Amino acid sequence: MPRPRTPLPPSLGTAVFTVADAQSLGVSRRRLRGDDLLAPARGLRMRADADVTELDLAAAITGGIPGAVVSHRSAARLWGIPLPFADRAEAWTPRTPLDLTVPPDASRPRASGIRAHRAVIPPEHVRRVAGVAVTSREWTFIDLGRVVDLPHLVAVADHLLRWPRFPFEGREAPWSTPARLAALVEQAAPRWGIAEVRCALARSRVGADSPQETRLRLALEDAGLPAAELNVPIRTPGGVRLHEPDLQWPLWRVAAEYEGPHHRSSEQLDRDIDRAERLRRHGWTEVRVTARDMRDGCRRAVVRVAEALRESGWEPGRTG
């Protein structure tokens, strides 16, 4: 029969604590190796059954590293920047390494659980989230040039540039502007990944509402299809608003809509069918793109949109 675990001192309190604090309260090394504890980084323990967030862990780790700033993928997750193409930020688990940037003259942390970087971060691009130093959203975009591929980086730029929907997000301005990001790129150069950042900014567009919309747009552009308008309302000649599709080509009266998981409910499905029928009555063709269409580099989506455009009079090689 397994020996009952010795209870941890109540004064340890938090879900994440240092080995030093635990030992000062009389917790033995053997107890600190118990299977109910995880070791997210050297010198730290975390209760395995606790509801710990990445911010909790970041607070515990950065507290012992002077000048450390949460950066790269970790900063992206804390800011809700979607990585990779998904409807939410890249998933985090307590075993996911924490990205930290320290000053160039500081010792690079080599503990397990930490992915360390050395760089100078402009003070104006260091923010505090619940007391934890984190790179700004804009500087996080610069950092991600080293660690994600170009399509993902374009999705990050689109995320920062999109105009929010106030009733749902409680803000009225985008996180950045093309001019601000362009100025920051020049400020950050030269550095690894800056060429990719510059290219991503050149391909970014104001208007994409999700990474999947960005992925679809890039695939259509790369296939030589004409540039689409993004999330612009379609109105009747009398000014009645019909819909605001993800992408549209007004010259050919074709629209494309990416339908994510939330479109699977019967109520939403009914609304989608009514919307498509309403557009059809006013002379529009709507291409409803699903996850299946997005496989293999969006190959099926490209074929379907191209067919709809050709049937409406577009000729390959003609942009508008």
Image: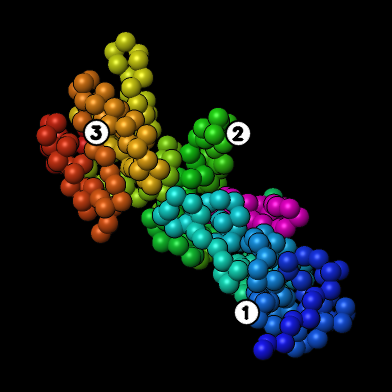
Q: Please tell me how crowded label 2 is: few (under 14), some (14-19), or many (20+) other residues with Cα within 10 Å.
A: few
Q: Earlier in the sequence, mark 1 or mark 2?
A: 1
Q: Secondary structure at mark 1?
A: loop
- The image shows residue 217 at horizontal and vertical percentages of 32, 45
* Residue type for callout 2: Gly
* C-alpha span from label 1 to label 2: 38 Å
Q: Which mark is residue 170?
A: 2
Q: In this view of the protein, can residue 67 be seen by the observer?
A: no
- Residue drawn where x is 67% and y is 65% of the image: 50
The answer to whether residue 145 is visible is: yes
Describe residue 192's horizontal placement relative to residue 271 as left or right: right
Residue tagged 1: 112
Residue displayed at 75% across by 88% down: 30
The boundaries of the magenta stretch are: 125-141
Which residue is denoted by mark 3 in the rendering?
Answer: 286
Structural distance between the alpha carbons of marks 2 and 3? 30 Å
Q: Are marks 1 and 2 in contact (CB under 8 Å)?
A: no
What's under tag 3, amino acid-wise?
Answer: Glu
